Image (cartoon, rainbow, N blue to C red):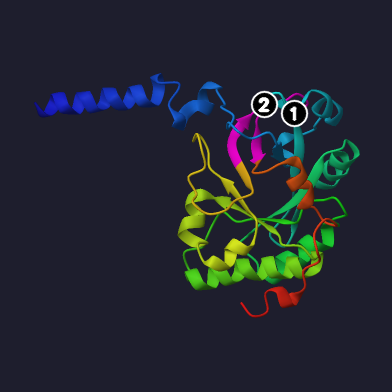
Amino acid sequence: MGGAMVAALYIAFFYYIFISPYGLRWRALYGYVSYPEGYDIHGIDISHYQGSIDWAELRERGTIDECPISFVMIKATEGATQVDECFHYNFDQAREHGFTRGAYHFFSNQSTAADQVRFFISHVKLEKGDLPPVLDVEKKPKDISEERFRANVLEWLRKAEEHYGVKPILYTYHKFKLEHLSDPVFDRYPYWIAHYYVDSVKYKGPWKFWQHTDRGRLPGIKGDVDLNIYNGSYYDLRQMTIGSQEPIGVEAYRDE
């Protein structure tokens, strides 16, 4: 009886992993990408991993569920020493081809938050009409406390906010947000949630962007690309951009 139970469990596991192509967890492995219903404003995020992008083709033919690509988030920097090799070209091309563009920084645990935000600012010149700066946080080192980690992330956000005059966007995974960035102080920043292969966002708090798959395909881009939606109208998206918001000074968070 024990052997039969083990065999049954093995068969069930094998079916779940290798046979069932429509399970939410493995949709992307079978080339099936679902688009969240009820959203019209779509975008992508890119880095050097996408290689050379045909921006004209992306502008002309790039649509998601018959909706045009409205915004492009572009990796700019990582840590305190790395600039994405395609950033400056992609950043220029995104504006030239009429996309609402944004730039993001991948947070590293190998250098201080102060050094990282200075490095980002030195390489990213955001202009009127650009989205606020984005901080991508995905890992917490085991050798520092939760309090110290949150303080480091908050330092980057506050210094970027002081420099650019707008609230930065905070990107992270759904589970990571709940485990490490659940302090209410982070709720004042627009949240960009990464949560794949689910039919709807499970996060209970407010959010602005949802990265719903890393297996999207679009004309002009070779290979996979992350697909995102904006939680609002195109007018709302444009209202987030620099020059469309009231400037935010240090006094906005001095008493927090």
Q: Crowdedness of circle 2 by 10 Å Cα count: few (<14), some, many (20+)? A: some
Please state which of residues 16 and 253 is positioned toward the viewer in this rendering.
Answer: 253
At 47% from the left and 51% from the top, the residue drawn is: 175
Q: Horizontal placement of 3 versus 63: left or right?
A: left
Q: Horizontal placement of 250 versus 143: left or right?
A: right
Indicate the position of residue 99 as horizontal and vertical percent values. Answer: 82, 39
Above or below residue 18? Residue 125 is below
Evaluate if marks 1 and 2 touch, with contact meaning CB atoms under 8 Å apart: yes
Residue 157 within the segment the image draws in magenta: no
In the image, the segment drawn in magenta is 211-229
* Residue 214 in view (yes/no): yes
Q: For mark 1, give the secondary structure.
A: loop
Q: Seen from this angle, which residue lies furthest bottom?
A: 255
Q: Crowdedness of circle 1 by 10 Å Cα count: few (<14), some, many (20+)? A: some
Mark 1: which amino acid? Ile
Q: For mark 2, give the secondary structure.
A: loop
Please state which of residues 78 and 124 is positioned toward the viewer in this rendering.
Answer: 124
Give the labeled residue for mark 1. Answer: 221
Q: Distance between the residues labelled 1 and 2?
A: 7 Å
The quarter in which the N terminus is drawn is top left
- Label disc, if present, on residue 217 of the rendered structure: 2
Mark 2: which amino acid? Arg
Please state which of residues 207 and 118 is positioned toward the viewer in this rendering.
Answer: 207
